[in-house]
Structures are given as structure tokens and as C-alpha cells.
Amino acid sequence: MADYTNLSMDLVKLQNLTLNPAIPASVCEQLVSMIAKLPADRWIKREQLHPTRATSDFTSCSYYSCLNESIPLDITSLLLKYNPSPESTLQELVINKYHNGDYIPVHRDRQKYRSFALVPLETNDLNGTIVEGELITDIAGRAGIFNGTMLRHAVPPVVGTRYTVLYLYE
């Protein structure tokens, strides 16, 4: 298991993270209900980070992704309606699903995107994303908008089930 305690806090880098309300809680509940019913063949099991994304030798991970083409149109339409950064050019939507104990080690995202927004769909004080050493707990519909791809972040082992949406921008 990855060591999440050695992430140093860098307030300058955290200036590249903005937290904004994006999706109303009632819409998040609706989305969770819809997403939870997706069949298994829509999900890709993720077990290894690409080496270019990892920030250490620890590259194993555990979570599921539903990518652009696999997201049903009714869910896509709803997600597009609440795009957290409409002034940016949206390239891709990804829904991530985590089961109890799933995680992603410390990493940086792909440089082909200039920014991205991470939106948890449920509120849970036990779950969240560690960004440069600071735990940002999950609040349903609150977007963490990452400007650039240099912020190191991780998902510590999840308690229960967790759903998040990634909006990836050019």
C-alpha cells in the first residue's frame, strides 16, 4: 500500500486548485442512482498507473473508470449541463467508481490536458483526495478545479463506495 503520510504541503502549488460548487446535491443524488445501475461491461478495472503519471515506484492502484463513449447519453447530458469550467474546452468526461479499500497512489495527471475538474458525487468526511499533502474531503457537487497537471494528488483507501466525475479540458 502506498504511503500517504509523506506528501509535503506546498501552498504555492495549492494556488492552482480552486474549490467551487458545481452540481447541486439533488442532481448528485440522481447521478449516483443512475451510475450505480450501469452494467459491469461499461467499467474498466484500473490496476496500474502509467509510469509517466506516477511520482514514485509505487504504481499499483485499484478503481474503475467509465469513459466518454461508455457513459450513457442521459448521464452525459446531465454532466454537461453542470460543467464546472464552461469557459474551457472540454475534451473528455470520466466517471470513476471506487469500492471499499480502492485507492490511487500519489500521481500527476496526463499533460495532454491543461486543466481538469474533479467532482465527488457524494458527501463523505472519510473519503476525499489528498492534494499536495492536504486532504480535500468529498462534498457532493463541489468541484476541485486543477489548473495544470503538476499538482501531486492521491486517493487514499476508500471507505464504502465512492463516485467521482472528471472533466478533462484542453
Image (tube, grey):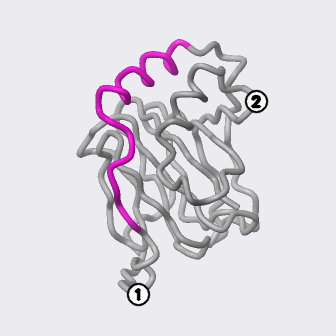
| Residue 24 part of the magenta-drawn span | yes
Indicate the secondary structure of the residue bearing disc 2. Answer: helix
Mark 1 residue type: Val
Q: In this orientation, which residue lies closer to the viewer: 32 or 128?
A: 32
Q: Residue furthest front?
A: 87
Q: Amino acid at mark 2?
A: Glu
Relative placement, left or right, of 53 versus 11 is right
- Residues in magenta? 18-37
Circle 1: element type = helix
Residue at point 76% right, 30% down?
A: 69
Q: Is residue 123 magenta?
A: no
- Please provide percent x and percent y for residue 15: 40, 79
Side of 135 relative to 84 (left or right): left
Look at 63% across and 40% down and name the residue there: 94
Residue furthest left in the image: 125
Q: Residue 101 location in percent, x, y?
A: 44, 38
Name the residue at 64% across, 63% down.
109
Give residue 87's quadrant in the image. bottom right
Residue at the extreme bottom: 12
Tell me: residue 125, above or below residue 162.
Answer: below
Q: Is residue 111 above or below residue 77?
A: below
Give the numbered dot on residue 25: none
Give the CA separation, mark 1 to mark 2. 36 Å
- Number of numbered tags placed on the structure image: 2
Q: Quadrant of the C terminus?
A: bottom right
Q: Which residue is mark 1?
A: 12
Density class for disc 1 (Cα within 10 Å; few <14, some 14-19, many ≥20) is: few
Q: Quarter-wise, where is residue 121 in the image?
A: top left
Query: In the rendered image, which residue does mark 2 sit on?
Result: 69
Main SS, magenta residues: helix
